[in-house]
Structures are given as structure tokens and as C-alpha cells.
Image (cartoon, coloured by chain):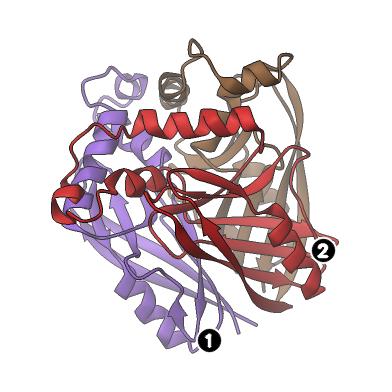
Chain colours: A red, B brown, C purple
Amino acid sequence: MKIISRKINLSTKGNGEIINITDYVQSELKKTKISTGIVTVFIPGSTGAVAAMEYEPGLINDTKDLFKKIVPESNKYSHDSTHTNNGNAVSHLRASLVSPSITIPFEDCSLSLGTWQQVVFIDFDNRPRDRKILLKIIGE
Amino acid sequence: MKIISRKINLSTKGNGEIINITDYVQSELKKTKISTGIVTVFIPGSTGAVAAMEYEPGLINDTKDLFKKIVPESNKYSHDSTHTNNGNAVSHLRASLVSPSITIPFEDCSLSLGTWQQVVFIDFDNRPRDRKILLKIIGE
Amino acid sequence: MKIISRKINLSTKGNGEIINITDYVQSELKKTKISTGIVTVFIPGSTGAVAAMEYEPGLINDTKDLFKKIVPESNKYSHDSTHTNNGNAVSHLRASLVSPSITIPFEDCSLSLGTWQQVVFIDFDNRPRDRKILLKIIGE
């Protein structure tokens, strides 16, 4: 059994941008030579989220629309009164409906995803960010 | 420390069907003879979700209703324009509000669930499916 | 590679109370002397949830409001007809929008959280509870 740590660096546009990070995760996995195990993909930050979805342009739009509908920009939020410079309460709240963490199994050095299933990072922040996604790979 | 992979095969009806998979997971866990650790339960597919809940008929209905209310069938979705044969944008969007993955601790070969807490698979797809749920069991 | 189990005992007020448990998790982590790995934080109970967020008073209010808006008290729920003594369908449904489980990486015995990111337990139940949060720490 081994445990290996990796990082993925991303420059994001924010505002709900959804980035397909499957190839990055898969590529780091291959390099570890660990054959079977789990990888935890984690964003250290409370306005980002990690998830899995079909990365199809129509569905990407639908997903962005869904989070805008559930947490509308037009509401008043207490967080925006506290942090007057940010105005990113919606970013935090939308992220809290997904998760900063996903754990995915792999076999033969390959993520055990469905045919149409991709690993994505969603940047809900309201400005461009430089992000570090953390990977912990455990297996043998 | 050991890592063991198992699969659960399910025939599902779709349309938000919620299936109690606790006994399947527990049974596979027992067979591994691993006493303490974590099990990652994962659905390789973007219209399914894995969660934990009280498996009570009233609450099952309430849960189905909740996802129908948050992601209504009657809206127009871009994904349904792209994949004209599927019409399952709502399946993807509802699944994205849960997660394809849950990691649960266990002790003495037994899942550390609450008294009323069960592990469930939710099939949000709009048709019956044959599903493979993946388990990765890590521990000693 | 080692695996260590720990528990955090909490007395909660319920009704969506959000408790910052970062220091508890961090403190248990330090005691294990495991340097690098993952910790799974799990609530055995279906009316509680574990998440990560910026623990800021304004945002705490916004988060409580969001779950009340998505799952309103005023609706009729089937679960409340079945369990006439509880009336906590909303507790279950709100918890199902978060998760009972989060897996967080750590390095140098320290949780790999963002600057403003905290680990929280949310007690959605409609009454005070004594809760045991489970930690499984895997690493080396």
C-alpha cells in the first residue's frame, strides 16, 4: 500500500466556470504506477467544488443555470454585508450545494468512471483565480 | 493494510427510484474479513447517485418530490436539444445535487451507520438500467 | 500505512445549527502522528451533515436560510404523517442536500484546507442532540 500526493494547477475564470479535469487526474494517476485504489480530489477553498458529470456543452449550461436559479444573484445575503469588498455570498452558497471533495476508485491505473462521466472542477467565485487542486492517491 | 474491490449488480427502474443497498455493501464487507477501515461506494454513471438516508416509505416519497421540485420536468434544458433521443437533462441535474460517491467508515466488519441510516442508490435516469455499483474497501 | 479511528462528541442545539469542528479534527489528527493521508469525517445519523465552508457569521445565516428556502417548513411531507412524533422530514431532506461524509487530505499532520475553509457539522434535527462524529485517518 502506498500513498502519493499530487497537485493540479488551474487558472480559472470563475462565475461558475466548469472545467474538465479528468485528463489531469488520469495523467497524475498513471505516473504513480499504483494499479488499484482510490483518489481523493479536493479543492482547498470554499468557493470551488469538485464533482463528476457528463461534460456536454448543453448540460454545462443547464448546470450553471440550475445553481443560479437555486441561489439567485438578486437576493440579499448577510455575507455580502460583512465582506463588502467581495460580494461573493452566492459563490459560497452554490459551492456548498456541491462539495470540495470527491473520492473515485481506480483499477489498472485507470479511473473507474462511466462512459460519459468526467471529473470536473467548478469555480463559483466571482473573479478569475489561480487554483491548486489536491490529489491523494491510495492503493497498491 | 489491504485494499479489496467488489461490485454490486442492480437492475433499476429509473425515474428517481431509491434502492436500499446497505445489505449488499455490508455483505461484501463481511466477506473481505477486513475489520476496520473505509469503504468508498461509487456509481460509474452521471445519472445515478449514492447517498445515505432513513429508508422510510414516506421519506422516500418526500425525497423524490424534492428533486422533482428543484429540477422540474417542465423546464427547457439545453442538454435535451443536444441529445434529442434522451431527454434526460433532469436526470443529470438531479444526480449532480447528490454525488456519485460516498465514503463510509466501518468497525468490526460492520458499517458505522446510525440506527436509522441506510446506504442508498438513486437511479435518476428516465429508463430502466442495469447498474454496477463499485466498492473499494481499504483497511486492516 | 496506518489506519486510526477517533470520535468527536458534540452536544448540539439542532435546527440547522452549524458547528465549526476544524480544531477537533485537527487536534485528533496531530495525536495520531500520521504525517500524510486522508481523513474521512462521518456522521452516523440521517439528520446531520458534514461539510466545509467559510465559518463567517453572515454566511452561516445565509446557509441556514438557503436550506430553509429549498426545503420549507410550511410544505406537507409524507414522512411527518408516518412518524407523527417527529415532524422532522425537513431535517432529513435538508441533510440529504449535503452529505454525512467528507474526505479531506492532510500533509505534515495538518488538514489541507484553504485559508478561509473550515470543517463543519450541521445539525438539521429539530431538537438538541448528543452526537458522535467519526474520524477514520489513513496514511503514513
What is the x, y in percent for residue C21? 30, 66
Near mark 1 (Cα within 10 A), the count class, few <14, some 14-19 or many ≥20, is some
- In terms of depth relative to the viewer, which is nearer, B75 or C47? B75
**The disc labelled 2 sits on which kind of residue?**
Cys
Viewport quadrant of the N terminus of chain B: bottom right
Query: Is C134 left or right of A71, judged from the image as shown?
Result: right
The kind of residue tagged 1 is Ser
Report the chain holding disc 1. Answer: C
Quarter holding the C terminus of chain B?
bottom right
User: Which residue is disc 2 drawn over?
Assistant: A109
Mark 2 vs 1: CB contact within 8 A: no
Report x, y in % for residue C97.
41, 39
Choose between C72 and B119: the one closer to the eye: C72
State whether residue C104 is above or below residue B49. Answer: below
Question: Is label 2 or label 1 in front?
Answer: 2
Q: Residue at x 35, y 24 (%)?
A: C79
Counting labels gives 2
Res. C74 image quadrant: top left
Is A33 or A74 nearer to us in this picture? A74
Helix, strand or loop under label 2: loop
Is residue A119 or residue C100 the one in the foreground?
A119
In the displayed structure, does residue A99 sit left or right of residue B43? Answer: left
Would residue A134 be found to the left or right of residue C8 on screen? right
Which residue is depicted at the point 76% across and 51% down?
Answer: A112
- Residue C35: mark: 1
Q: Measure how far apart labels 2 and 1 are at the Cα level.
A: 25 Å
